[in-house]
Amino acid sequence: MADFKKIIERLTDIVGQEFIKTRPEVIRDYAVDEMIPKAVIFPRNTQEVSEVVKFANREDLAIVPWGSGSKMSMGNPPERLGLVICTSRMNHMLDVDTSNLTITVEAGVKFRDIQARLATEEDRCYLPLEDLATEAEEVICSDRSHSGCFLPIDPSCSNTATIGGVVATNSAGPRRLLYNLPRDMILGVRVVAPNGEIAGAGGKTVKNVSGYDISKLMVGSMGSLGILCEMTFKLLPLPEKMETLLLSFDSFSDASDLANRIFETTLLPAAVEVMNSTSFTNLRMDDIPAFDPGKYVVAVAFEAFQEAVERMVTDIKDMAMDFGVKNHANIKDHAHLRFWLAVSDLDPTLTKKFPRLIKAKLNYRISEWKDIFEFAHKTLAQNGIEHAILARAGSGVCLINLLMDPGSDGLVGKAVEAMAQLLERSRKAGGNMIIQRAPTRVKNRLKVWGDSGSDFVVMKRIKGQLDPSGVMCPGRFVGGL
């Protein structure tokens, strides 16, 4: 490896001196699990990313991609770290083809800005415009093109996340119940492989791939197989009517029975979330109507034609009466969007209050969601650990936040043991558990990616073929890949 000064000189030739940061006070902000990179690079386009990665290969510099940083808490601590490649300058929407319901964007575009760009003539968009701050004139088109579409992805931290980070982590939220996952919306990608070569797959049509679908392979790969630079997605028209129904219960049994009853009908809600009162009271939203959450809240989202929404709201209200609902509230249109944005931003909200928070994502057979919820609550309560639980009842996913603050060091051992019990319970239910956030020193005591399955052999082989030098996010992914 060349000395550091020569490395910086070569990188300067690629991206320019202004877009390489090496000052300690700057690069500390790009630490990955407390490991500080030697330099942070801000390439302008795919070609510059390619040249930086080729150079890193020659110099054996480990690389970690970075979008906005909203999801950098995921994964194992890296084995080594040379360069962070930040995509913030790659923030252009390259092709907005609303006539054919597709959009092509660079990886550094903020998810919220995509939705704002797709606003309708009536100034309605899938994220409320008054909550958006335009960061660059070229990011959000001023005339908005009156397209009336939206990108049907519902990620966590949707107000800050970049689209590259959303895809790299396969981030999905409550409305995956109706809209599925990012991998279902992606049509094509341009990616810089670990050897620096630029590869493309897919395109603007649905049937565009023969053989292995590289686009799908990159979704959820956490940067371990290359750096996503451009992506093409399919869009959907905005729903005619949007509404949320909040229902409070004093009994989890009643709340869960209502959720299960909804899934026994032919109704098609966009989301059915069951959360404890701790989760609900920490949602950062000022204009929720007067509503007593009780001990548990069922939040049901509706996004469809007006008649369908009205029918579903009426039917579910009637159902709730049979299960002892305490009270209810309706949230419509922009308030509906702000509510689900608050749900999306629950993680950063809790992290500000509880800096040593531990977050786990459990998956399992959908039929066992109620038992998993009760088991998690009982296990954490017995250990005296304050927690926020939110279950996506129809998706087989449960998010658990252990609210650990600097004064809860004595509970760390109990938290680690509780996580082991939750992992074991999830495995018995045919699933797994992933630690999505934890202090670095605690991560080393946890199975961050849960238990590896039989597919790990294939994953290891793919990683070995695409990244034989191990320069892309070494050690960050499943099984230390």
Image: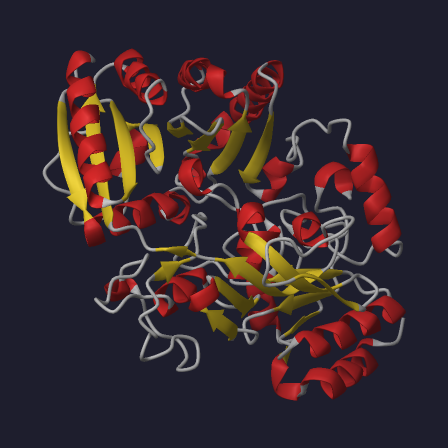
Left or right position of 143 against 468: left
Q: How many marks?
A: 0
Please tell me which residue is depicted at 83% across the width and 41% down the height of the picture. 460
Q: Nearer the viewer, residue 139 or 75?
A: 139
Q: Residue shown at 51%/62% (left/top)?
A: 68
Answer left or right for 397 relative to 440: left
Could you say where residue 425 lies in the image, as x and y percent from the top left? Answer: 57, 15
Split into 4 quadrants, where in the image is the N terminus? bottom right
Q: Is residue 54 left or right of residue 84?
A: right
Q: Quadrant of residue 458?
A: top right
Q: Is residue 37 visible?
A: no
Which color scheme is applied? secondary structure
- Placement of 434 over or under 211, stated as above or below: above
Q: Percent position (x, y) of residue 400?
A: 45, 30
Residue 457, horizontal then vertical, whole percent? 83, 34
Query: Which residue does the image show at 20% across and 44% down from the upper left?
Result: 306
Q: Nearer the viewer, residue 197 or 18?
A: 197
Q: Position of residue 266 (x, y in %)?
A: 33, 25
Would residue 438 be found to the left or right of residue 154 on screen?
right
Q: Is residue 390 above or below residue 346?
A: above
Residue 425 position (above or below residue 158): above
Q: Identify the residue at image location x=84%, y=64%.
A: 195
Q: Furthest-left residue in view?
A: 290
- Along the viewing direction, whichever of 167 and 121 lies nearer the viewer: 121
Q: Is residue 60 visible?
A: yes
Depth order, front residue of 388/103: 103
* Quarter containing the C terminus: top right
